[in-house]
Image (cartoon, helix red, strand yellow):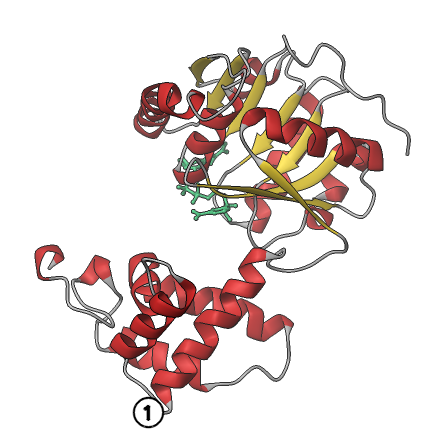
Amino acid sequence: MSFQLPDRIDTRPIAILGAGTLGRRIALMMATRGAEVRLFDPNAEVREAGVAYAREQLPAVLETIPDGKAGTIVGFDDMAAALKGAWHVVEAVPEKLELKKSIFKQIDELSDPDAILASNSSSYPTSAFADSVKNPARLLSMHYLMPPRATPVELMSCGQTDPAVIDLIAKLMPSYGLTPYIVQRESMGFIYNRIWAAIKRESLNVVASGVASPQVVDAIFRQAMNTRVGPCSAMDAVGLDVVLSIEEHYAHEIPGLPEAPRELLRKMIAEGRLGVKTGKGFYDYPAQK
Ligand SMILES: NC(=O)c1ccc[n+]([C@@H]2O[C@H](COP(=O)([O-])OP(=O)(O)OC[C@H]3O[C@@H](n4cnc5c(N)ncnc54)[C@H](O)[C@@H]3O)[C@@H](O)[C@H]2O)c1
């Protein structure tokens, strides 16, 4: 299907749906080119906290972007108003397939016909929502990691995305302080999360089989990779229940993955060792108990 790329992208607003962990960070990055960024979230408390976070962080982020210019970050409680006139819409709502499908139906109806529509979903490719959009040529996955700390953005077609849309977004991202990486074919976990999943899985395997303790796994990884955080303490920070549900999703999609990492996670979860949030995981966190 053909698609007319949006015009006046320097002056038209950008709409972000969902002001949670990722939505507010995407809003922050999108506010570095001088335009209005609209942050929509039905939860007033989260919305206000998201707007406050993005406004607060903006000066520091602008210092890292040559020719960056402060935009205006505005909270919206009305989706139609947030989408009106926007050249770009990014969905960052909770990871629930039915919710995403229904949001894309609404976005499709309420957005300008030339708006480029993106999903930040970590586990659902946009091919899963393509039926919700009349012209999927304007739909793509844009998977942000954790800006402003981690600034890659993975771009992946929904299978019907106009290649000109991916080219345009890839060309624009560096001016927002982001680095685009194009995923060449549909891939659960995009690029980075697949690599990270393998590191987590094998670290769990090493611990489960008694080859080394979590402390030793982290120490050798930190020293060898010259990094501050090892895989076991990173898993503790994310939450071992979240780590397990991600691994179960991979195991469902990729037959033959080893069982031992999931068995170790299930055992630790049954013992209440979910990581930082329960005060103990691979390590103890007395202050969090
Ligand atoms: N957290 C991460 O590390 C991370 C990293 C990359 C991608 N993602 C993806 O980003 C998306 C959002 O994740 P998150 O961690 O920011 O979630 P989150 O729970 O922190 O935030 C989601 C927000 O969406 C809001 N919301 C619910 N229904 C909505 C609706 N109808 N319209 C608009 N907003 C609505 C909620 O109030 C909430 O504030 C998910 O698809 C996730 O896979 C998350």
Residue positioned 35% across, 82% down in the render: 264
Front residue of 59/242: it is 59
Q: In this view, does 126 lie above or below 56?
A: below
In the foreground, 48 or 191: 191
In this picture, is 266 found above or below 34? below
Q: Is residue 41 visible?
A: yes
Q: In this view, does 134 lie to the left or right of 287?
A: right
The kind of residue on which mark 1 rests is Gly
Q: Callout 1 environment at 10 Å: few (<14), some (14 to 19), or many (20+)?
A: few
Q: In this view, does 43 lie to the left or right of 65?
A: left
Q: Which corner quadrant of the image does residue 86 belong to?
A: top right
Q: Is residue 274 above or below residue 186?
A: below
Q: Does the residue labelled 1 lie within 8 Å of ligand 1?
A: no
**Circle 1: element type:** loop
The C terminus sits in image quarter = bottom left
Q: Is residue 262 visible?
A: no
Residue 183, image x and y in percent?
Answer: 71, 51
Query: Residue at (59%, 58%) from the top-left corner?
Result: 189
Q: Where is residue 37 in the image (x, y as percent from the top left)?
A: 51, 17
The residue that mark 1 highlights is 210
Tell me which residue sits at (33%, 22%) in the image.
48
Foreground residue among 181 and 13? 181
Residue 241, x across and y down, in percent: 35, 65
* Image quarter (top left, top right, bottom left or bottom right) of the N terminus: top right
Most distant residue in the right direction: 2
Task: Count up the numbered dots.
Answer: 1
Residue name at image x 33 percent, y 26 percent = 53
Residue 29 on image: x %, y % = 49, 27
> On the picture, is 58 further left or further right than 99?
left
